[in-house]
């Protein structure tokens, strides 16, 4: 094994007397470098875009959320509250009421989701950071905070006391509707703030005090639709989930942030996988230049291979020489490509070389798993290409007639 590896290193460092073969070898190495560099740069770009996309929704996503398993709501008993207050895993939790409503302002109206929150909500999520105009609402009031999209669609102002905003929700029950008034519960509110998170939330959510939502929906004081939790630092999420489930039982389903954004995570992960496979195919085409380079090297070194064969080196060992040479070309080229791409990513993070908008640099993120994935991918492809090329060495090739 040491002898074929030694010869492979010598062949890799030495120049051929034929300039065309030297040129082909250089092209093959450049192909490996470009393949690994482009693969890592694109994966880092997608990782950056993923973090950039998720940071907006994660601002208002709790660490854990307990939603009603059956129907739309559940009863939170005083015993449940007492047990939740004693949980060492939980730093804060907030009672939530969510329901689809109609919001009307002057001659305009739109569908939205009202989210009634209690006084602990801002301790669970950092909502102040996404308020664009105005302030957060006060409990025991008719104040609401609306999304930027709803505010824009309805032409809502902030603190306009002369023009109330009406929120309607259908009354529960059966029977014939005799009038619009009997069909809906309604409440007059005033907007005190506008938030900006992402397009989906901006166009669909309105935040209100929890007692306003309870009255609008005719809920009991201990009837809610969800509980949102902020966990203490360093707490094991899965254990905290088990402890909360043990208290609340089967009446709730507990989700973490990834599960709350399940569709978004799936979309981003699918796109990332598709791009990885596509670029792996491109890298495969580039790396397979190694096969051509090795075959040309075999023909060029035919006389020296005959000498090795005559002194007792087996055909199997000669095959190993070219297998090691191609593998070294791929591994070294992959390492150089990764190094260059890391420098490019570092420059992008430091100096914002590529901009999405005049004020927003293209986000990139360096992840250890992407470094390992790229290096492993390029190395495996290079080893496969080297194996394919090395089997071209036959006894007839190394024998001189």
Image: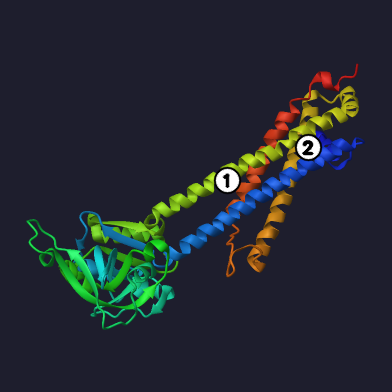
Q: Nearer the viewer, residue 283 or 259?
A: 283
Residue at x-position 64% and y-position 41%: 282
Kindly report which numbered mark, 1 or 2, lies closer to the viewer in this rendering: 1
Tell me the quarter of the image containing the N terminus: top right
Mark seen at residue 276: 1
Judged left or right of residue 318, residue 208 is left
Judged left or right of residue 386, residue 84 is left
| Residue 140 x, y percent position in the rendering | 23, 80
Q: Nearer the viewer, residue 179 or 217?
A: 179
Say what secondary structure mark 2 lies in: helix
Q: Nearer the viewer, residue 378 or 289?
A: 289
| Residue 159 x, y percent position in the rendering | 32, 82
Number of numbered tags placed on the structure image: 2
Q: Examine the image and state in which quarter residue 60 appears.
A: bottom left
Q: Residues within 10 Å of mark 2 (few under 14, many from 20)?
A: many
Q: Examine the image and state in which quarter residue 216 appears.
A: bottom left
* Real-space Cα separation, disc 1 to disc 2, in angstroms: 27 Å
Judged left or right of residue 135, residue 381 is right
Residue extending farthest to the top is 401
Q: Which residue is mark 2?
A: 325
Q: Mark 1 or mark 2, which has the lower sequence index?
A: 1
Say what secondary structure mark 1 lies in: helix
Residue at x-position 19% and y-position 65%: 169
């Amino acid at each position: 094994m040491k002898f074929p590896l030694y010869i492979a290193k010598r062949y890799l460092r030495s120049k051929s007397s034929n300039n065309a073969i030297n040129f082909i070898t250089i092209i093959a190495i450049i192909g490996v470098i470009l393949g690994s560099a482009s693969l890592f740069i694109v994966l880092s770009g997608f990782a950056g875009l993923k973090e950039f996309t998720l940071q907006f929704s994660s601002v208002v996503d709790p660490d854990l959320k307990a939603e009603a398993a059956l129907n739309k709501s559940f009863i939170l008993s005083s015993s449940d509250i007492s047990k939740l207050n004693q949980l060492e895993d939980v730093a804060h939790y907030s009672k939530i009421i969510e329901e689809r409503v109609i919001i009307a302002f002057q001659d305009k109206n739109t569908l939205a989701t009202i989210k009634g929150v209690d006084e602990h909500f801002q301790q669970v999520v950092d909502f102040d950071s996404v308020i664009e105009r105005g302030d957060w609402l006060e409990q025991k009031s008719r104040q609401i905070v609306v999304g930027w999209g709803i505010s824009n669609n309805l032409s809502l102002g902030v603190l306009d006391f002369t023009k109330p905003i009406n929120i309607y929700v259908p009354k529960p029950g059966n029977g014939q509707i005799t009038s619009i008034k009997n069909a809906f519960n309604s409440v007059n509110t005033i907007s005190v703030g506008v938030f900006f998170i992402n397009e989906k939330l901006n166009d669909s959510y309105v935040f209100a005090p929890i007692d306003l939502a309870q009255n609008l929906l005719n809920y009991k004081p201990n009837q809610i639709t969800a509980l949102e939790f902020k966990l203490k630092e360093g707490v094991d999420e899965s254990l905290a989930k088990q402890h909360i489930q043990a208290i609340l039982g089967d009446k709730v389903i507990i989700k973490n942030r990834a599960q709350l954004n399940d569709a978004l995570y799936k979309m981003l992960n699918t796109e990332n996988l598709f791009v990885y496979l596509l670029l792996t195919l491109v890298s495969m085409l580039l790396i397979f230049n190694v096969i051509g380079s090795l075959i040309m090297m075999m023909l060029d070194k035919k006389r020296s291979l005959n000498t090795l064969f005559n002194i007792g080196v087996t055909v199997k060992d000669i095959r190993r020489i070219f297998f090691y040479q191609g593998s070294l070309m791929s591994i070294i080229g992959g390492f150089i490509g990764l190094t260059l791409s890391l420098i490019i990513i570092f420059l992008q993070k430091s100096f914002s070389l590529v901009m999405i908008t005049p004020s927003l640099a293209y986000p990139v993120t360096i992840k250890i798993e992407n470094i390992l994935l790229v290096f492993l991918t390029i190395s495996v492809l290079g080893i496969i290409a080297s194996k394919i090329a090395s089997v071209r060495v036959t006894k007839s090739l190394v024998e001189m007639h």
